[in-house]
Structures are given as C-alpha cells and as structure tokens.
Image (tube, rainbow, N blue to C red):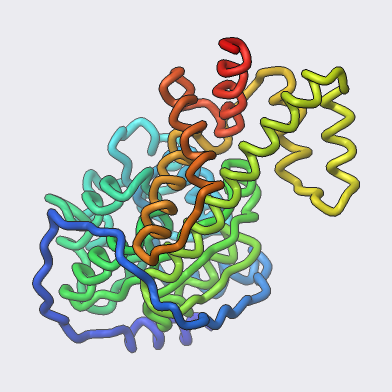
Amino acid sequence: MALWVRTTMAKYCSYSTQLPIHFAERPISAFPAKRLLSVRYKAFSVQASAKDGSSTSVGFLGLGIMGSPMAQNLLKAGCDVTVWNRTKSKCDPLISLGAKYKPSPEEVAAECDVTFAMLADPDSAFEVACGEHGAANGIGPGKGYVDVSTVDGGTSKLINQRMKSTGASFLEAPVSGSKKPAEDGQLIFLTAGDKPLYDLASPFLDIMGKSRFYLGDVGNGAAMKLVVNMMMGSMMATLAEGLLLSEKVGLDPNVLVEVLSQGAISAPMYSMKGPSMIKSAYPTAFPLKHQQKDMRLALGLAESVSQPTPIAAAANELYKVAKARGLSDDDFSAVIESLRAKLGSS
C-alpha cells in the first residue's frame, strides 16, 4: 500500500493555473443548484490507516480546541507529523509526543507532503494559507493542502486558487463534530476538491474521523458544513426555549430531556447538553462565538441564493445576545442565557 501512496503522490497535479487573485475580496458566492452526489466511505481501522499512510509526511497548522486532539490522534497512530501554531506553547504537548516543529506555515508546507489546517474563522484560514509566510509560499507541485476549517465557500475557493497557482493540490474538508469527537477520532469529514488528494488523505481522515463524504467541487464541502451547523444552532436555541418553558410551567426540565431522548426527535445533543444547561454549566466543547460565526456565514450563503431562513435568523440573534453578555468562549449551549436574560427583564 505504501507503493500506492508514493505512486499517487507522483500523479498529483503538476500544472500551474495562473489565475488573478484579489486577496481583499472574499465574497460568499452562490453554489450550483444542481443535485449533488454524496459518496460515503466506511472508515478503516486506525492501525490500517497508519500503515497505509506511513510514507507520507503530514503537517498540521492550528492547535486549538479541535486541531490539537486531531494532530494527537495522527501522532498516536504513528504518523510523521510536523506542527505549527501562532502560540508556540500549544505545540509543546505534541512535540513531547514526537511531533516536529516549524516556526511558520510556509516551512511546514515546504517540509510535508500533505498539510492539514484547522483555523478558527475565514480570516485566519486565509491568512495562514495565503498570507505572509503562509503555506502557499512553501507548497508546490506534488504536495497537498487540506483545509479542515469551517469557512464560507468564497474563502475556500480563493485558497484553492492560490494553492493551484503553485502546482499543489487542494481539498476542503470541514468537520462535523466538536471537542469530544475530535479526541475520540469520531469526526465526520465533508470534503470537496482534488480527488487524488482525497484518495491520498483518506487514511489520515480515517484516523481522525469515523466517516467521510466526497462532495465534488470546492465550495460544496463548505456549503454542507454551514447547512449542518445552521441546523445545529437552531436546534440548540429550540432546546433552550423548551427547557425554560418547562420550568416556567412547573415541569421538571430533567424529565423533559428524558422524554426527548425516547421520542422521534431524540438527538444525542439534547441528552448531552440538556442536563448541563439546566445547571447553568457550559463546559466548552464548541465555543459559542464559533457557532454564531457559522450562523452568520450560513445566513450569507442563504442570501446568496435567495433562500429564506427565518428560523436560523432568529436563532442567530440569540447567539449575538449571548456574545454581548460575555459568553463567547463558553459552549454554544450557553445561548440559553440570552433567553434567561429576556425572562428576567420581562
């Protein structure tokens, strides 16, 4: 299998697409209205994935709440990993596990066959990929860049163009899942872009996740992730409303959570987050500021194709109130506090 990996690397796109890139402009662009074909692959075992990808060196940029456990899983599986983070101290635990360190994204991309990036927002993702000392300055033909950040389609397409202009390959692969799934290697990857890079990166995706979808052209992965997170944010806001209403009418909200777990609208998120929300405890698995960012990007996507999203728009306002109350770094379930504030002022 190692021979297959080396052969695949040799077949990477070596052409250079010279496209003018206006870095200051990152519009949220419309996506094709045609029906997309989704292909789901069964994840391999961690042991097989590590063996299959053993000859490929891997870079990882961004070691925050998601990136750090993802990179740790690659290291624990025996992968050759080089890391970078703006705050160098966040690299130290990974270095102690055997990771190499480079002081810039440019140097990581120059060193590695495939570079993964997990950044907090579109601006950070773009800067790390395309800015001064960004990955694009070190990458080139025969190498690949896999952006697992959650960004809008316009940003993803600009990063794709920049990488392609160097002769490198590009794959967007935003993830569905938060801190615990990242730690457990149970993420869902929503990928789009260069198929040969998808094939090469798949063993590594299987180490970090439980399933992966290949969705075709760049932008489709970003769109799918925004739709998923828009729905998740709206569901959380609805759960918050239900918990508070049950309390207000004299019901036990813990019983409500149990009822929900046994009915047609059962969702793991309700059982996982509900009990903590009742206690006003919000241990951070997915920061509220990131959920609100994703709601904003999803609303922009909807507007670009003239699709009304009134429920998501209303939920977004609640996340904005929660941010204004200083809850940005709490878990997104803290959105309930925006409703508690309204209840207290009524």
- Could you tell me which quadrant the N terminus lies in? bottom right
Q: Measuring from the top left, give residue 48's x and y in whole percent.
A: 63, 71
Q: Nearer the viewer, residue 345 or 14?
A: 345
Name the image quarter holding residue 279. Answer: top right
Q: Which residue is found at the position 50% from the left and 64% from the top?
A: 224
Q: Nearer the viewer, residue 196 or 160?
A: 160
Q: Which residue is found at the position 65% from the left and 62% from the top?
A: 210
Relative placement, left or right, of 201 versus 252 is left
As drawn, the residue found furthest toward the front would be 346
Relative placement, left or right, of 289 versus 134 is right
Image: 213 above or below 231: below
- On the question of residue 272 being in view, the answer is yes
Q: Which residue is found at the position 44% from the left and 26% from the top?
A: 323
Image: 313 above or below 22: above
Q: Measuring from the top left, give residue 77's x and y in whole percent.
A: 57, 58
Q: Which residue is found at the position 22% from the left and 66% from the top?
A: 139
- Could you tell me which quadrant the C terminus lies in? top right
